Image: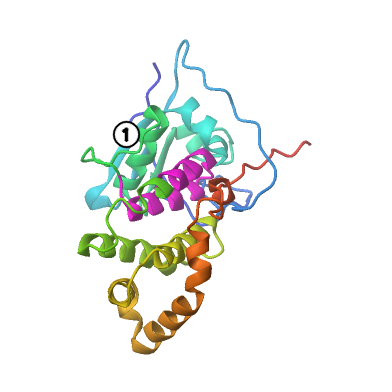
């Protein structure tokens, strides 16, 4: 088997994939979350000799190398397909990529899922809300639509796994909302749309003013009294509609939050 050496020259990718006359490194671009075209995937084939690539992620002090089947990455990501096959990018010859701004834990969850079809954290536990939001964000960066949509389904299942009336449940939801709203690259994404819809549904299921206050304080307490008070009034006024939204026949289908793959343009 052909395996790349970790000592091979790596390069830190810039923020643009625009072509230039010189050799350059590949870098992910933000995919259109509402793309309507589909690309043709390179079929998986693990028969015969295999090629591998190495992705080194994380800051220098805590970097981690992942050696992955090249065929597997190409099947799931048009970004990696281009990076490791286009002669314009140094990765096509070095078979190694350096991503210092990527979390080893989040990248590890994605790689593990590519091989096992299961989301697991490095400690072997199921990821929580914010873990899955990070997975969606990174998968979108690399245009891994299968992982994006799988993380949306996982978010749908684990959304209320921590009881919302417990301190842990409220804190988990706050971290999830904070993460989604504090990252500008998630503006307009289906992940943000789902976060808003799920949070409104959560408030629609709340019974009693005391529980409402606990949720508002726990999730939006840092926003200030005026913002919290205004939001509370909005939630109270919309309560009948929110309650209807939580009914099975009114609940939006999960596919509404899916990312569609882009098609490769014919020459």
How packed mark 1 is, by other alpha carbons closer than 10 Å (few <14, some 14-19, many 20 or more), is some
Q: Position of residue 245 (x, y in %)?
A: 52, 61
Task: Identify which residue, 237 or 132, lies in the foreground.
Answer: 237
Q: Position of residue 19 (x, y in %)?
A: 63, 49
The single residue placed furthest to the top in the displayed view is 48
**The magenta segment:** 127-154
137 lies above or below 40: below
Residue under the point 55% across and 35% down: 81
Q: How many circles with numbers are drawn on the protein?
A: 1
Residue under the point 32% across and 77% down: 209
Q: What type of secondary structure mainly makes up the magenta span?
A: helix
Task: Identify which residue, 226 or 214, lies in the foreground.
Answer: 214
Task: Identify which residue, 23 or 176, lies in the foreground.
Answer: 176
> Is-magenta flag for residue 267?
no
Q: Position of residue 74 (x, y in %)?
A: 53, 31
Colour pattern:
rainbow
Mark 1 lies on residue: 6
Q: Position of residue 250 (x, y in %)?
A: 56, 55
Residue 27 visible at all: no
188 with respect to 217 (left or right): right
Q: Quadrant of residue 43?
A: top right
94 lies above or below 58: above
What secondary structure is marked by label 1? loop
Residue under the point 37% across and 28% down: 116
């Amino acid at each position: 088997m052909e395996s790349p050496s970790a000592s091979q020259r790596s390069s830190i990718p810039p923020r643009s994939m625009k072509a230039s006359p010189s050799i350059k490194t590949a870098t992910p671009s933000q995919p259109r979350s509402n793309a309507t075209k589909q690309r043709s995937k390179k079929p998986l084939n693990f028969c015969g000799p295999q090629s591998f690539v190495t992705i080194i992620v994380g800051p220098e002090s805590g970097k981690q190398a992942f050696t992955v089947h090249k065929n597997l990455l190409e099947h799931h990501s048009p970004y990696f397909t281009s990076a490791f096959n286009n002669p314009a990018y140094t990765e096509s010859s070095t078979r190694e990529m350096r991503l210092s701004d990527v979390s080893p834990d989040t990248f590890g969850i994605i790689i593990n899922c590519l091989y096992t079809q299961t989301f697991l954290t490095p400690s072997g536990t199921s990821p929580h809300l914010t873990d899955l939001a990070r997975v969606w964000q990174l998968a979108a960066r690399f245009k891994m639509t299968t992982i994006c949509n799988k993380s949306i389904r996982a978010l749908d299942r684990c959304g209320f796994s921590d009881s919302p009336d417990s301190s842990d449940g409220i804190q988990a939801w706050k971290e999830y909302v904070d993460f989604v709203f504090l990252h500008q690259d998630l503006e307009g994404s289906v992940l943000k749309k789902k976060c808003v819809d799920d949070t409104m549904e959560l408030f629609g299921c709340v019974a009693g003013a005391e529980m409402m206050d606990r949720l508002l304080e726990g999730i939006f307490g840092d926003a200030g009294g005026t913002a919290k008070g205004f939001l509370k009034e909005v939630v109270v006024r919309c309560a009948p509609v929110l309650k209807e939204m939580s009914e099975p026949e009114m609940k939006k289908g999960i596919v509404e939050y899916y990312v569609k793959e882009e098609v490769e343009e014919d020459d």
